[in-house]
Image (cartoon, rainbow, N blue to C red):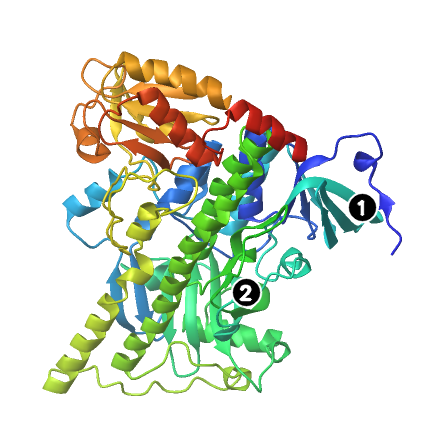
Amino acid sequence: MSISPHPKSAAGTKPIEVAIVGAGPVGLTLAGLLRKQGVGVTVYERRAGLHRQPQAHVVNTRSMEVFRRLGIDRQVVAAAAPMAKLRAITWRESVAGREFGILSLMGGEADERMQRLSQSPATFVNIAQNVLEPLLYRRLVELGGDVKFGHTIVGVDQSQAGVCLEINADAGGEFASTADYILACDGAGSSVRRALSIEMVGPTSLQKLITVYFRANLDRYFRGSPGPVHWIVGPDIRGVLIGFDMSRVWALMTPYSEPDRPEDFTSDVVEQMVRKAIGDPDAEFEISSVCNWNMSAQVAQSYQSGRAFLAGDAAHRFPPSGGLGLNTGIQDAYNLAWKLCAVIKGHAPSTLLETYEQERRPIALINCEQSLCNSMRMGEVDAALGASSMSPVRPIDALHEVTPSPDLGLDGDHAEAVAKRAAVASAIDAQIEHFDSFGLDLGASYESGALSPDGTDSPPISVRRYDPSARPGARLPHVWLACRGKRVSTQDLVPDEGYLLITRDKLKNWRSAVAVASAEIGQPIRHVCIGPGADFEDPQGAWERVCGFDKEGALLVRPDGHVGWRALVKPKDPTVALVTALKSILRIRQGVSADRQLVSARETQ
């Protein structure tokens, strides 16, 4: 293959610093975070533009905190589906037909709901991917970045000096470009991952599905139970109906299996599938597109190969049950971005990048297992109903007249019907973890990596329950503080670049420790005191209850808002303790001058 050099990588010019492959939500988030720190980024996307179809739709609270740091959280909330319509998950014969059961998303005690809302300055949203991506793209452009659409990576060659990319541009043929690092955010079928020969671990195929995207006004059918997910359990059509804006934009996902093939789902077939799923022969709808996809449960064997890193679906592929895939990817980006910035700017040795896999892969394994568990537990509802929501649909059946619904034995006051209705309701209630993973959302914590442990025990993993903790590795707990008459979240104290040291007293020893440590590592450390008479007061005592250190201790927070170190009590020498902790986080060898080691590291990068 003869490849001409790209003009920007001609001899004598500095190569781009980071190449990102894929302009989906993960790639765009990662690019925006890097540009916000002034890192040079080039994003390559094989498609001609952003996604046209809705695809993913759940953005959890932690991801919204990332968007808050990126400066687009308000735009995302404004563009998302109305919260008032996110009321329920239903199991039904069809949209217009009988409702077999309902799982309320508004359940729980009011105190519990308020408690959850108090755990973050952000909240989850339901937003279609093709609505989210333009917001991320516009923010990237505002930050001085852009995307090269119609550019396909066809080869990756690494050396100690950097990465050479072979690129096929739709409008300009083949050329070569260089980068310091390449980040693969190019989805489940990642070409970069294949080029790096990184294997995926886990089941390759759990189920094959056809997705039909369509537009229709279905408001009148849902009556008092609007919501984002509706399981269709009919004699002729089965699957799940996804609502993106809860009003007009929908997707019907239906399983199929051999001997049927994707091409057997012709326009006539999918039209009848949608008509039967709606359950009204006179319903008006417009089909936007049809695609087929493979559901798997896999995590990459490695997240790094030299100067190349995987993020998002390129690193992990989950069943969609629970909406954990997109969100795990957004948080991959948040973890990797600050570490790349630190290394590229010479603030940390390249060994810091090894902690990306150490921290994020265990989280992906947990989320993959939970997604798989969610998917498998759906069978409990099917068993209770005596009908299946996810057994394969044959295209030939879709063209037949509507089959009369079988008697499922749910009607009447006799003991068997009462017992069956109770069993169905119980099975549906047991699906709550499928749609409520608040504990995994805010409770994701790193056990090893870019942190300095304090010897406290790790809390048990809980899918739904989140107990705020300031233990090293945990997300910095959110508390509303008072500052000059305004409310400020602890989350907003974290600087975009550098570190945050939180103390509860204005001790001179900590102030001098910050000055010395900042000079030692060459990065700013913001020192904030939270307590009576301080700039940031804790009027409700919430911070005092969750911080876990005494009046003379301290907490060091990384740029991604995770705790890196905690001094439960005042160290014998705060300066030595803080410098030692920072070197541990940044992987700077103890006993070696940070300045001397980082100069050496820069020379080898």
Residue 453 in the figure: left or right of residue 286: left
Quadrant housing the N terminus: bottom right
Quadrant housing the C terminus: top right
Amino acid type of the residue tagged 2 in the rendering: Met
Find the distance from the CA under tag 2 to the CA under tag 1: 28 Å
Label 2: which secondary element:
strand
Label 1: which secondary element:
strand
- Residue 381 placement (x, y as % from top left): 29, 75
Q: Give the residue at x 83% y 36%.
A: 7
The numbered dot on residue 176 is: 1
Residue 127 in the figure: left or right of residue 488: right
Figure check: 383 above or below 299: below
Q: Give the residue at x 29% y 59%.
A: 88
Q: Give the residue at x 38% y 64%.
A: 369
Amino acid type of the residue tagged 1 in the rendering: Ala
Q: Nearer the viewer, residue 294 or 361?
A: 361
Q: Quadrant of residue 487?
A: top left
**Residue placed under numbered mark 2 in the picture:** 200
